[in-house]
Image (tube, rainbow, N blue to C red):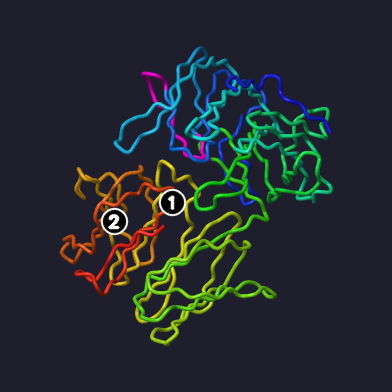
Amino acid sequence: MVFRTFTSLIKLTGLLLLATGLTACGGSDDDNSDYTYSYIQFYNASPNSATVTMREVDGDAFGSAQFGDSTSLISTDSGELELEFIRTDSDDQEVVVEEMTIDLRDGYKTLIVLTGDFSQPEFIEFEFERESLDDHFRLMVMSTMLDESQYDFYLSEDGDPFEAANFLGTISYQELSELTFWDGDDDSDDFDSGEYTIYLTNPGETEVLFESQTLSFSYDTEYVLALRDISGAIQNGMTIDAVLNSSYVTNITDVDADAQYRIYNSSNLDTPLTVTFGGNDGEDDTVFTLSAGELSEFTPIKYGDYRVTVEADNGEVASLNNKLITLNQAESKAIMIHVADNKLGAATFVESGLPQSYDKTVSFINLVGEFEDVDFYLVRSDETIDTADYYTLNMEFGESNTVVLPSDYYEVIAVYEDENDEQVLLDRTALYGFTEDENYIVTVEPAEDSSTGYEIRILY
């Protein structure tokens, strides 16, 4: 197999669509069209980064990207362009992370990739010429893994196994390489549109480290695949981002990647709860106990569909039987056990995969069965709930939501509106520092020793 580094991919500083039918903006639909503008896009691959905005110095913003996301593709005129990349700190002040000048050319796309540890970020510039394609696509691959490892890249057709896959080359850190199709024809040397499976191994080895689902390459455009670290609730592992010409980045996980979960007992029962986590036939059940107010540690587990049964040892409340919990590859899920109408129940949500070093992706959940429209406000020392910048409103019982906020100290206030549309306080906290590199969960739940009968709990 031939591997080539595309000569016009220039390192100046140093989506895939699943078969389920995700869409994104692609290349040209007109065989005779030419790309007459210059194009620029920013992709964030730093696993402990803040949200970063790309903008012209003393000019317009071109969009922002969290870790694992990109800006939209910007069409602009050719020539020099002075750029700055900024984040916002806890005082809502802009911090310039990087400044750079790029030279844009008509018909070419410039992709700027943020890599490395965000304490010493690296902004890498790549350039390649865009082409009008017909029933074909181009494939470019790079690694942004912090350990700077190399990987052998294989591709098979129509979900064929690794033994039938084609070796396309070795992928290196911070180097964008264009791969060559193994079965080019008279019409094109580019890849035929269709379904493929990705395999990764260590260089020169045959043990598969990563296997994708069967993926549909259905757009006539350039696909950029970025191998990157996993962040957020799951700290270890590798995933692949597919960057096309839109702000939507498709994340591709290893089909054999583990999942994880943690469980919280929000009940006020005097007796502990027994939780049984059951898998498929032939798998042993996991059984453990949780006291009132206890949050379990993260538990790694094979991906799949599980049944969860929760029982109170004294039979004080009705049990929760065979609740279905689905855990997908590389997914972390929180399971929040509650009591309503003298019955045990559970609400679940997926925990954030974003880094928590600078911006905090906080999960909120209403565990008060009496109210269907609870509001949470995060109020800084110079704010009230009327002026607070961060909040989530009208949360029903068992409903969860997330709010992304800068690392800072906040008073958390939970209220509901009565039949007269008047706000009634459920609970409030003292100023609390959302400052640690943790996945925070904020609940409001019944409490016997609270003056209002309810309390806010901040879990991590």
C-alpha span from label 2 to label 1? 20 Å
Tell me the magenta residue range.
Answer: 56-70
Provide the secondary structure element on which disc 1 rests.
loop
Q: Are marks 2 and 1 in contact (CB under 8 Å)?
A: no
Classified by dominant secondary structure, the portion drawn in magenta counts as loop
Picture residue at 32% right of the left edge, 44% below the top? 408
Towards the viewer: 46 or 25: 46
Q: Residue at x 63, y 34 (%)?
A: 224
Residue 69 highlighted magenta (yes or no): yes
Does the magenta-highlighted stretch encompass residue 16? no
Q: Earlier in the sequence, mark 2 or mark 1?
A: 2
Q: Which residue is mark 1?
A: 438
In this picture, residue 333 sits left or right of residue 229: left
Where residue 168 appears, x then y in whole percent?
78, 35
Name the residue beneath numbered marker 2.
376
Answer above or below: position of 309 versus 314: above
The answer to whether 173 is drawn above or below residue 333 in the figure is above
Q: Position of residue 339 (x, y in %)?
A: 37, 76
Q: Quadrant of residue 58?
A: top left
Residue furthest to the top: 79
Q: Is residue 412 visible?
A: yes
